[in-house]
Image (cartoon, rainbow, N blue to C red):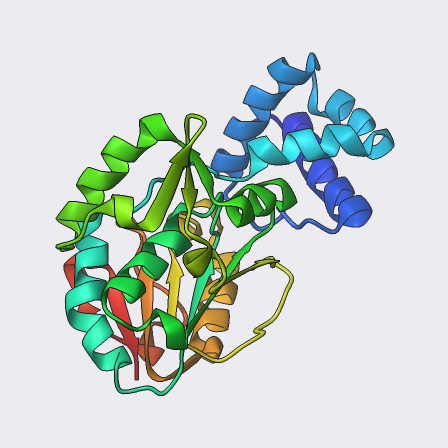
Amino acid sequence: MTEDAELELRLLLEAIYQKYHYDFRGYSVASIRRRLQQALGAFGCSTLSGLQERVLHDPATFRALLRYLTVQVTDMFRDPGYFKTFRERVVPLLRTYPSIKLWIAGCATGEEPYSFAIILREEGLLERSVLYATDISGESLEKAAEGVYPLDRIAAFSELHRRSGSSHSLSEHYTAAYGAAVIDRSLRSRVVFSDHSLATDNVFAEVQVVSCRNVLIYFDKSLQDRATGLFRDSLCRKGFLGLGSKESLRFSANSSAFSDFAREERWYQKQ
């Protein structure tokens, strides 16, 4: 990256932070630059400076740009081994709590929190559970709260659900109508969707489980440490932290606060 290009990038991210209070300054430079290159073509801008001018003077441009800057690709029961470990090894310990709270950070369009809610329902724990699902994208949170997904995605979801260790049919948890699958109200009512930034916001609740998958890989080391510090402070004693398949606490400043619980599936337990 040339010196001018590096300056343009810093100025754009600083402008976004100052104007809209979204902080991407601690994101991986390679990742954020790759996404911005895609955005330049979509917005018809030749330089980041040109994009910055539009972002500063047109909030609609920033809302559209946010779709490029945040990761919104996920599936229900993505990496089923992760959810199978939760079902078979974490859930039995959650049964010992009178009330259960989970925090799904970076929830995108809701597939992951609904996956957890479905498992809790199948295991008879949903009625005493609350799931906090957070993201920085208001647009994604709106879609997540609706709980509506195209029917053509359901076959893949169903297979992943089966591989997560379920003996139930996924069809028990949604209603099909007009080419879409609508998640049951009983599931949606247990999930609280809320705006939250791991870069700027603080802990908001004590929980037994934190799941934050495929988010830390887009942060630089300093922001990764901030996020894992939030998870540490949010978790109760002996609480559980789940990360993405390419993420680890190995080099984290907060690694000493956790022990491996299911290393292969990236589940950790607070000391």
Note whether 82 is above or below 19 in the view shown.
below
Residue in the picture at 48% in, 50% down: 219
Number of numbered discs: 0
Q: Nearer the viewer, residue 39 or 2?
A: 39
Work out whether residue 141 can be spotted: yes
Residue in the picture at 31% in, 73% down: 125
Residue 38: quarter of image: top right
Work out whether residue 249 can be spotted: no
Q: Can you say which quadrant of the picture contains the C terminus?
A: bottom left
Q: Is residue 140 left or right of residue 100?
A: right
Residue 68: quarter of image: top right
Residue in the picture at 82% in, 26% down: 53
Residue in the picture at 32% in, 50% down: 173
Residue 70 drawn at (x, y percent): 54, 40
Q: Can you say which quadrant of the picture contains the N terminus?
A: top right
Q: Is residue 158 left or right of residue 4?
A: left
Note whether 106 is above or below 60 in the view shown.
below
Q: Nearer the viewer, residue 201 or 6?
A: 201
Q: Nearer the viewer, residue 207 or 151?
A: 151
Q: Is residue 129 left or right of residue 19?
A: left
Residue 167 drawn at (x, y percent): 12, 55
Residue 106 drawn at (x, y percent): 48, 52
Note whether 193 is above or below 71 in the view shown.
below
